Amino acid sequence: MKTSLSKIIILLSLGTAIAVGCNDTTTVQQRPNILFIMTDDHTQQALHAYGHGLLDSVLFPNMDRLAKEGAIFTQSFVTNSICAPSRAVLLTGKYSHINGKIDNSVPFDWDQPTYPKLLQKAGYQTALIGKIHLGGKPQGYDYSMTLPGQGSYYNPEFIKNGTEQTKLEGHCEAIIPQLVVDWIENDWDRSKPFAVNFHTKAPHRNWMPEPKYLDYLEDHEFEFPENFFDDYQGRGTAAREQEMEIVNDMYWGWDMKFEKNPFTGEPSRLPAPFGRMSREQMEAWNSVYGPPNEKFLKEKPEGRELAKFMYHRYLRDYLKVVKSVDDGIGKVMKYLEENDLLENTVVIYTSDQGFYLGEHGWYDKRFMYEQSLSTPLLVRYPQEIKAGTVVREMVLNLDHAPTILDYAGVEIPSDMQGKSWRSVAAGKTIPWRDAVYYHYYEYPSVHMVKRHYGVRTDRYKLIHFYYDVDEWEMYDLQKDPDEMRNIYDDSAYSEVKEMLHIRLNELRNQYDDSDELTWQFLDDYLSKRQR
Ligand code: SGN
Ligand code: CA
């Protein structure tokens, strides 16, 4: 076949051009690069752009920039609010009961189809840098540099291409963005578009700040969330029996950064991993945490004052590590900008789930309540998305795989269960879902959040807790946004209840979830536990 070279415009400078169409008017279209940024446990309350009021003057300028120059999704949810399952949903575009990764402990089957594999097949060069938490050897990536399991904040180990382990000096939130920049600078094959998964560790527990941010916010006072001292009345057993209360369930060493339990003098059940730090890092640490810890040991506050101390230590550490994440995003964005790559890169920012910052007195996630069901979602792609776009459609992490394939011009497999949000981000009105389906499995396990599934519409939520209970909860999010009053048995809502049950069944059918499947997973789980 003869090709008229004169008709092909080669965008040498950008190097990511491919020819599409084969007729006389052959044009060249650049497929965008994809920078997918996923943090671990970053919640909407800790992002200024979401306007929750917690942060007032605490700013994360690079994340805020993404929202300002792109789109913010106000109703962005996950299908199973826990790390590894969320990442499996991200890669496969399928619910946990279909991709098999229902909780953090069952193995993930890397042999199944994933969006990075499809991108690779379509000519993208792919890289995965940071936390993935799926065990095994990553597939679908030309390069991977991942943290083993949860990884470490200080002087972390990494696994290169699923095999070689190396220890890098420094703080992981400085290292990971540097690895991203280095890969693009040195290893990116400029004849192909790239798709990079830039996955941070922060702000996952146990929130160990980077040296330069040790004293960031140390003088900052925060208000307790209104329901910090929740007594869990008016709801079922699940909210009462969890083990994720800041005051009762945090460790003095690991979370509060004390050498010993200040009240009993016993060593903490889980000490902070200070052993990983160099002498210099430890000295910097002690210079900031030493004095307030000394003061605490003298005063030994109780009751509300104790809660205030614990809440502040937690929240400040959490926000300090988010600050490093924000710097890392800034670093990568700056690199792209300075190298004329930013305008042709779709930048997506999200987290693997939301998190509690003291609402209901909690930290951690798992529940289908708002703070952990939601997760931030920002996207910048000026070629299609107007600055300052606010998307109100309900999107799921299930949708990211089809969306990325859509941006890349790759056919979306019909068995992916999500829906591309590319058009809604571009401001188009298209038929969209009116409800989302959720299913959480990891119980009994750390934090003891009972198994449950449910449906959320614009205004209402219906949840079924099962396994060792059989309890239903229902909330009117308009009247009760903090989810403090279960209205399942309120006769004023009987029609709404019926509608929600119908919608829940429809969604379970649509996504092929069922009690049979749930029992099958349970049987597998119980047989493994017995072994
Ligand atoms: C660890 C944490 C838990 C956390 C899970 C899951 N404990 O077990 O607090 O819920 O990870 O987190 S820790 O003492 O090891 O910090 S997830 O993000 O990986 O799902
Ligand atoms: Ca997580």
Image (tube, rainbow, N blue to C red):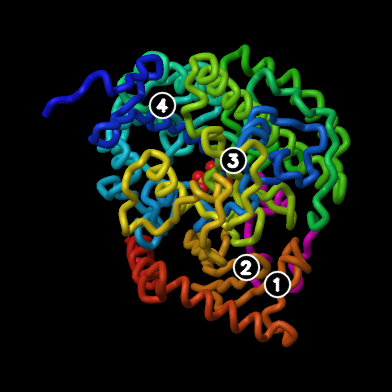
| Residue type, mark 1 in image | Arg
Picture quadrant of residue 338? top right
Q: Is residue 302 visible?
A: yes
Task: Tell me: 431 left or right of 324.
Answer: left
- Alpha carbon separation for disc pair 3 and 1: 33 Å
Under tag 3, what secondary structure? strand
**Residue drawn at the location 21% of the way across and 23% of the way down:** 4
Compare marks 4 and 3 and give the one earlier in the sequence. Answer: 4
Q: CA distance from mark 4 to mark 3?
A: 28 Å
Mark 3 and mark 1 lie on one chain; the one further toward the N terminus is: 1
* Residue 161 is at least partly visible in this image: no
Is residue 348 found inside the magenta-colored segment of the image? no
Quadrant in which residue 295 is drawn = top right
Residue 235: image tag: 1
Camera-nearest residue between 72 and 18: 18
Q: Secondary structure at mark 4?
A: strand
**Separation of marks 4 and 2 at Cα, in angstroms:** 37 Å
* Location of mark 3 (residue): 378
- Mark 2 Cα shell of 10 Å, populated few (<14), some (14-19), many (≥20): some
Query: Dots 4 and 3: beta carbons under 8 Å?
Result: no
Give the amino acid type for the residue marked by disc 2 in the picture. Answer: Ala
> Do the residues under discs 3 and 2 have CB atoms within 8 angstroms?
no
Q: Which residue in the protein does label 2 denote?
A: 238
Q: Which residues are magenta?
A: 229-250
Would you identify the image quadrant in which residue 207 lies? top right
For disc 4, the marked residue is 158
Image quadrant occupied by the C terminus: bottom left
Residue drawn at 58 percent across, 52 percent down: 76
Q: Nearer the viewer, mark 4 or mark 3?
A: 3
